[in-house]
Image (cartoon, helix red, strand yellow):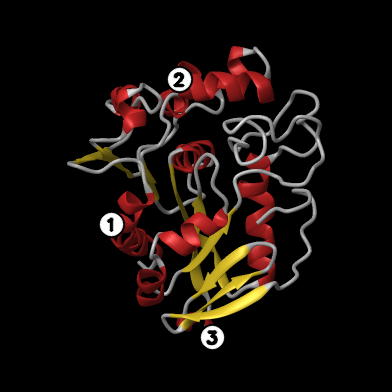
Amino acid sequence: MLRISWRRMALKQISSDKCFGGLQKVFGHDIYLPPKAETGKCPALYWLSGLTCTEQNFISKSGYHQAASEHGLVIIASDTSPCGCNIKGEDESWDFDTGAGFYVDATEDPWETNYRMYSYVTEELPQLINANFPVHPQRMSIFGHSLGGHEAVICALKNPGKYKSVLAFAPICNPVLCAWGKKAFSGYLGTDQNKLKAYDATHLVKAYPDSQLDILIDQGKEDQFLSDGQLLPGNFIAACTEKLPVVFRLQEGYDHSNYFIETFIADHIRRHAKYLNS
């Protein structure tokens, strides 16, 4: 939960609530500690939310706590952008700026100082978690929804071997070709196509140096953003054909909502646990 600046990393506990035998704690960052964490170290599973969301969407609506408790996983839920940066115009658009950081390290003024979400997610947040909570530093995985689902895949592709598993709900798979991505990427990264493609899973997977990463994507068949051409999973699947195994599940009757996540979250956590607890 980034409320002032992504660079402020000190921990201050805001709340602590019992849930399925573990504790849902908010430290300015939101962390679920399973009962197992009381007696030893646990694997860490990072969640990334989508456009307009905060960490609370996942915490209060996904129903993940029971599965996390059963499998002994520490769950860390990040916000989607820095908040309270007082940048002129940062709250004018729902799909850019506050709530829509796109998890990139911005290079364009005035975003480049605070909007460094990729480095935050992959470097600073894990360092903070490893230093303050009972987690295994080498046993972590990542997943997310929509914008966050795309970034989960990006983090895994840009850091071979760092994450044990990566799963995604309805990810934005080819942002350089969809309206959301074109708007955000041009604002944060400018017009250099190499900069843009460095945060596009469909382009990154073509140069992935390994073949050991298993990717699972769950996609609702009735997702409006799928039919509107914002997600483009077919482009990513085609790019993966000769590089990486990808499991794509088109779920009949489901859309882009939290109900979709709630339905399959236990299965995703179980799949992560297979890799993290082995």
Please tell me which residue lies in front, 228 or 82.
228
Question: In this rendering, would 15 be left or right of 216?
Answer: right
Q: In which quarter of the image is residue 76?
A: bottom right
Taking the image as shown, residue 84 lies to the left or right of residue 53, namely right
- The amino acid on which the numbered mark 2 sits, given as a three-letter code, is Cys
Would you place residue 201 above or below residue 122 in this image? above
Within 10 Å of disc 2 (Cα), the crowding (few <14, some 14-19, many 20+) is: some
At 36% from the left and 59% from the top, the residue drawn is: 272
Are circles 3 and 2 on residues that touch, CB within 8 Å?
Answer: no
> Which comes sooner in the sequence, label 3 or label 1?
3
> x%, y% of residue 133?
62, 73
Which numbered disc flags the more N-terminal residue, 1 or 2? 2
Residue at the bottom extreme, as displayed:
39
- In the image, residue 146 sits, relative to residue 174, either above or below, namely below
- Relative vertical location of residue 67 with respect to residue 161 in this rendering, above or below: below
Within 10 angstroms of label 3, few (less than 14), some, or many (20 or more) residues?
few
Residue occupied by mark 2:
178
Percent x, y of residue 125: 65, 55
Q: Which residue lies furthest to the left in this view?
A: 252
Image quadrant containing the C terminus: bottom left
Q: Nearer the viewer, mark 3 or mark 2?
A: 2
The residue shown at (47%, 63%) is 60
Which residue in the rendered view is the most extreme toward the front?
92
What residue does disc 3 label?
38
Q: CA–CA distance between discs 3 and 2? A: 45 Å
- Give x and y (percent) for residue 263: 28, 57
| Viewer-closest of 208 and 59 | 59
Instruction: Residue under label 1, please give it.
Output: 263
Q: Can residue 243 be seen in this view?
A: no
Q: Distance between the residues labelled 1 and 2?
A: 27 Å
CA gap, disc 3 and disc 1: 29 Å
